[in-house]
Image: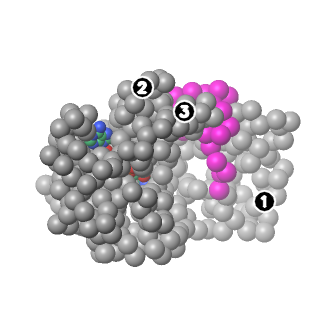
Amino acid sequence: MKVNYIVVGSGIAGSVLARRLADEKNQQVLVVEKRNYLGGYCYDYRDENGILIQKHGPHIFRTESEKVWRFLSRFTEWEDYQHKVLTNVNGHYYPMPINLDTVNQFLGTSYTAETVDDYFASNRTNPTEINCVKDVIESQIGPEFYHAFFEKYTEKQWGLSCEQLPPEIVARVPIRKNRDDRYFTHRYQALPKDGYTRMIQNILDHLNIHILLNTDYQDIKDSIECDHIYYSGSIDEYYNYCYGKLPYRSVTFQFETYPIEQYQPVSVVNYPNNYDYTRITEFKHFYRKKTANTVIAKEIPGSDGDPSYPIPTNENKELYNKYAAIPNEKVTFIGRLGEYKYYSIGQIVESLLKGDLPY
Ligand SMILES: Cc1cc2nc3c(=O)[nH]c(=O)nc-3n(C[C@H](O)[C@H](O)[C@H](O)COP(=O)(O)OP(=O)(O)OC[C@H]3O[C@@H](n4cnc5c(N)ncnc54)[C@H](O)[C@@H]3O)c2cc1C
């Protein structure tokens, strides 16, 4: 069998790329997906109550790019949604990221937008060198907020203490001087009206696109010829781990159904200090669904299982660069696993809409 292109993976990366090839090159594209469903990490499905469940955890679409928004809007209508996250510390809920209310409620103070910086200015540490995650965070927000909100969460997430974790793991800790309690403030923030899977089905719905589910690329690579491959699976797996395995953190989800209308006040609550899980997602909040039951997922980080988060240490980036440097004109690696990079959905689409298709 011969096709023009093979796209490995039907996540957002593979799907957008396949659609561009089908639209712009007008040639035959075969999408090969090892799972029995489309959508990769964005996969969602309706349960018996009609609640849309996101199998791989909460996915909130956001972007600053009008181009990305317009492109995806060809394939879905949108549900307005502004994501809000609370953090449960000592049994109380606090807005996340830290804003004026978080500070005042946690400390029992009455700082204003003008004075809240005084707290951080007099409490942040000033280490001579930033050697670990603890240094990064304490030097921005001070020990009190670090211990209550970040230390244990980060340790659960990465499986190492904050003194052992290299500084590049975490970015700037956002602190809002106002009372804005939205998690994201992007120009476009929404959820696909009928879910991500439906949006991805629509992206792939094209006469030039053919789909093989339940098929690992390794099993068909010798039986199908093509001109070029776009590969959104793991780059180290593609090369048979010849330089060793790229490390990932994985997350598993423990789903629970309760015969109650609502389990928690918002879709996501973080639990930094208690339990093995980092956060609980209650799915019905996303689409404001009214049902007698509710479904939640407890998110438990680990190191075995599906590769979820690339671990962005310098050492791992060097290992990735060795794989990426292997000369290979036949294959372009794309997406989270192909590029070993944490990407949001918006960032992936933006990167794949840029410029002309090289092959
Ligand atoms: C817990 C969690 C929460 C997240 N939350 C958000 C969020 O709120 N908002 C947001 O924008 N982003 C979020 N993300 C990021 C988002 O999931 C990714 O950016 C995006 O889904 C990655 O798309 P992808 O196509 O690169 O990879 P994937 O979705 O992983 O797709 C890769 C596909 O390739 C298939 N595949 C791999 N190897 C093979 C093979 N050998 N043969 C055939 N098929 C193969 C896989 O089965 C998979 O379907 C989150 C990520 C995680 C881990």
- Residue 138 against residue 46 in the figure, above or below: above
Kindly identify the amino acid type of the residue bearing the numbered disc 2.
Tyr
Q: Residue at x 33, y 50 (%)?
A: 228
- Residue 187 against residue 118 in the figure, above or below: below
Mark 1 crowdedness (10 Å alpha carbons): few <14, some 14-19, many ≥20: some
Q: Residue at x 26, y 34 (%)?
A: 218
Q: Which mark is residue 97?
A: none
Residue beneath disc 2: 241
Kindly identify the amino acid type of the residue bearing the numbered disc 3.
Lys
User: Which is nearer the eye, 131 or 101?
Assistant: 131
Q: CA distance from mark 1 to mark 2?
A: 48 Å
User: Which is nearer the eye, 41 or 158?
Assistant: 41
Image-based side of 357 in relation to 138, left or right: left
Q: Quadrant of the C terminus?
A: bottom left
Image-based side of 259 in relation to 312, left or right: left
Residue beneath disc 3: 322
User: Which is nearer the eye, 139 or 356?
Assistant: 356
Instruction: Name which of mark 1 and mark 2 comes first in the sequence.
Output: 1
- Residue 43 against residue 99 in the figure, above or below: above
**Which tag is nearer the camera, tag 1 or tag 2?**
2
Residue beneath disc 1: 117
Q: Secondary structure at mark 2?
A: loop
Q: Residue at x 82, y 53 (%)?
A: 121
Q: Magenta residues, as a range? A: 153-174
Kindly identify the amino acid type of the residue bearing the numbered disc 1.
Asp
Q: Secondary structure at mark 1?
A: helix
Magenta includes 146?
no
